[in-house]
Amino acid sequence: MRRFIALLLCVFATMALAEARVRRYKWDVKYEFKSPDCYKKLVITINGKSPGPSILAQQGDTVVVEVTNGLVTENLAIHWHGIRQIGSPWSDGTEGVTQCPILPGDTFTYRFVVDRPGTYLYHAHYGMQRVAGLYGSIRVSPPDGVAEPFAYDYDRSIILNDWYHKSTYEQAVGLSSNPFVWVGEPESLLIQGKGKFNCSKLSSPTLDPAACNATSPECSPYVLTVIPGKTYRLRISSLTSLSALSFQIEGHNMTIVEADGHYVEPIEVQNLFIYSGETYSILFKTDQEPSRNYWITTNIVGRDATTKTPPGLAVLNYYPNHPKRAPPTNAPAGPIWNDTAPRRAQSLAIKARQGYIHTPPPKSDRVIVFLNTQNKIDGYVRWSVNNVSFTLPHTPYLVALKDNLHHVFDQRPPPDLLHDFKNYDIYSVANNKNATSSNAIYRLKFNTTVDIILQNANTMTVNNSETHPWHLHGHDFWVLGYGTGKFDPDNDPKKYNLANPIMKNTVPVHPYGWTALRFVADNPGAWLFHCHIDSHFYMGMGVVFEEGVDRVGKLPPEIMGCGETKGFKKP
Ligand SMILES: *[C@@H]1O[C@H](CO)[C@@H](O)[C@H](O)[C@H]1NC(C)=O
Ligand SMILES: *[C@@H]1O[C@H](CO)[C@@H](O)[C@H](O)[C@H]1NC(C)=O
Ligand SMILES: *[C@@H]1O[C@H](CO)[C@@H](O)[C@H](O)[C@H]1NC(C)=O
Ligand SMILES: *[C@@H]1O[C@H](CO)[C@@H](O)[C@H](O)[C@H]1NC(C)=O
Ligand SMILES: *[C@@H]1O[C@H](CO)[C@@H](O)[C@H](O)[C@H]1NC(C)=O
Ligand SMILES: *[C@@H]1O[C@H](CO)[C@@H](O)[C@H](O)[C@H]1NC(C)=O
Ligand SMILES: *[C@@H]1O[C@H](CO)[C@@H](O)[C@H](O)[C@H]1NC(C)=O
Ligand SMILES: *[C@@H]1O[C@H](CO)[C@@H](O)[C@H](O)[C@H]1NC(C)=O
Ligand SMILES: [Cu+2]
């Protein structure tokens, strides 16, 4: 009897926990020598790992992450990518927008609710710190008893990344120097933190023979072991600092079923294109010849890296074959890097799944057209949006807005549309390369519907336009359409997909094209919207939206301590 009561209590306790669980994490962030692609360099780790620990939670849970900055000589901030931070805008982890940086030696606690099931990410959001390896995944499962619209036997996650041997500092200093020093193509591609750089390529022999060790277990390929005859859900995310990627599993087609936390009307692909900041779930069946292993491969698209960056390789290991046994074939080649047609086709094909469609408001209250250009300011190369290259103020916007510190950032609103947008030739290098830099922001009327048109254009190089993955903090947006060429404000909106648009938090604007988004400004706070290419954002490719800041609750003092914030950090 007593045992029965104990069992009952146990059951009740589990039920209560399932309702509103708190997931606590304690993270020590520090630099360590690591060799993720065989080349040894300083990498930022969380509890000794890069990628860091995965956050596993259920819809409605509260995630509490106590972060201690052990970087000694470097500030820190961590962003929870895809989590909207409803009611907790100060936990978005965007240094300069929602908080002061976490100083070396300090501990900061992020606390937020994961309100939707799906695949999300976290990564550093201070300067170009993400490049140094601080990133990981967040997996939110649906509530108990809520079924997903597809079935699978196993659930796995991988993050794709590009990897540089230059430090974050070398990259950042080069980008902000005159003459400009571009970061170049990455040395390798990592699949779940593992890649392979050809050590023989090092031009000068290093004094330390361990500096690049081709047999280091740290850079043995990532192995995904599978059981034949099963269906796998594979969550694939990209946190590249520059590269757009293609992803293939040799001999296996993939069915896309989720994008950025939203169910997708299933589409079968042999190749998945993925941009920095995006997450996808695909299903694949282990229905191929089981006596061998297969390649999993990722390649750079959109930039000519063919002679510079080798493909990223991992192994699909059919149990019980040996996980180290190399597949008997060559890895499948990636798609042609400069063929944008299949990439546009994938973007257009992704629609919300029937039965899971959130219908967008039929009309918007405001339309903002963002012309993406590369410019020079006083001789320095920058990226601009509507001729404004973004800079962060010393006082985070959230604090400045809430405390009415009007003097800490430019109060003049940046333009919704360039006055000469109609005449702007997106195919030629702009005659006037000058732009202005500013920390001005877009203030949105609370609860209004806003359309954003991302308009791509030529860079400062003749016949060149790049792909930019734009990421919005604090919201998901509807993707209403993609187009080639110049956006036509009179006719293109008539072609918007208002029936079953996918909702996302990151979306590409393709070369010489446009992408139209819609969102409702109903999340009080200050939210960054930026190109997810680290170097592009660092060079000014971003904007900030404010909405309903008067509705934001009392700011926690822990986010203060820089610029003109009045609060002090707790002792
Ligand atoms: C590694 O680089 C060396 C020197 O460039 C080259 O000879 C060799 O073929 C490369 N190995 C591989 C596996 O690419
Ligand atoms: C390279 O790594 C292997 C495997 O860990 C190790 O046995 C070897 O000593 C390393 N070589 C050097 C030069 O450190
Ligand atoms: C994958 O799909 C292609 C068509 O898109 C088809 O030709 C091929 O047979 C499929 N492969 C497998 C393993 O199902
Ligand atoms: C890709 O680039 C090659 C030259 O590098 C060119 O011959 C080819 O026409 C280009 N293809 C596309 C689709 O632009
Ligand atoms: C561009 O900026 C430079 C430096 O501020 C200035 O000297 C030059 O006149 C500007 N050019 C144009 C076309 O505005
Ligand atoms: C961009 O800014 C420069 C300098 O502020 C200005 O002269 C130019 O007219 C602007 N260009 C456009 C397209 O608005
Ligand atoms: C936001 O707007 C919607 C539709 O116009 C309305 O139903 C809702 O009450 C508004 N919410 C707030 C908080 O004002
Ligand atoms: C740029 O593209 C145009 C049109 O395709 C072509 O006529 C021109 O020769 C190209 N210029 C260069 C420098 O490649
Ligand atoms: Cu960009």
Image: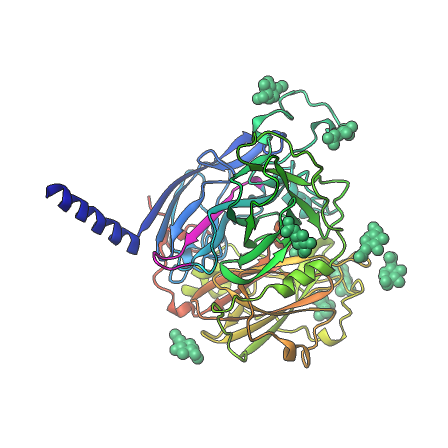
Residue drawn 65% across and 74% down?
A: 417
> For residue 442, which quarter of the picture?
bottom right
Q: Does residue 532 appear to the left or right of 397 in the view shown?
A: right
Q: Give the image location of residue 267, x and y in percent.
A: 60, 60
Q: Is residue 271 visible?
A: no
Q: Does residue 32 appear left or right of residue 488 in this picture?
A: left
Find residue 222 and report its image quarter: top right
Q: Quadrant of ligand 9?
A: bottom right
**Which of the pair 304/147 is nearer the observer?**
147
Instruction: Classify residue 306 as left or right of residue 267.
Output: right
Please count the marks in the image: 0
Colour logic: rainbow
The residue depicted at 62 percent of the width and 53 percent of the height is: 274
Extent of the magenta region: 132-147
**Is residue 81 inside the magenta stretch?**
no
Q: Position of residue 225 (x, y in %)?
A: 53, 37
Q: Residue furthest left?
A: 1
Q: Is residue 66 above or below residue 566?
A: above
Q: Quadrant of the N terminus?
A: top left
**139 is within the stretch colored magenta:** yes
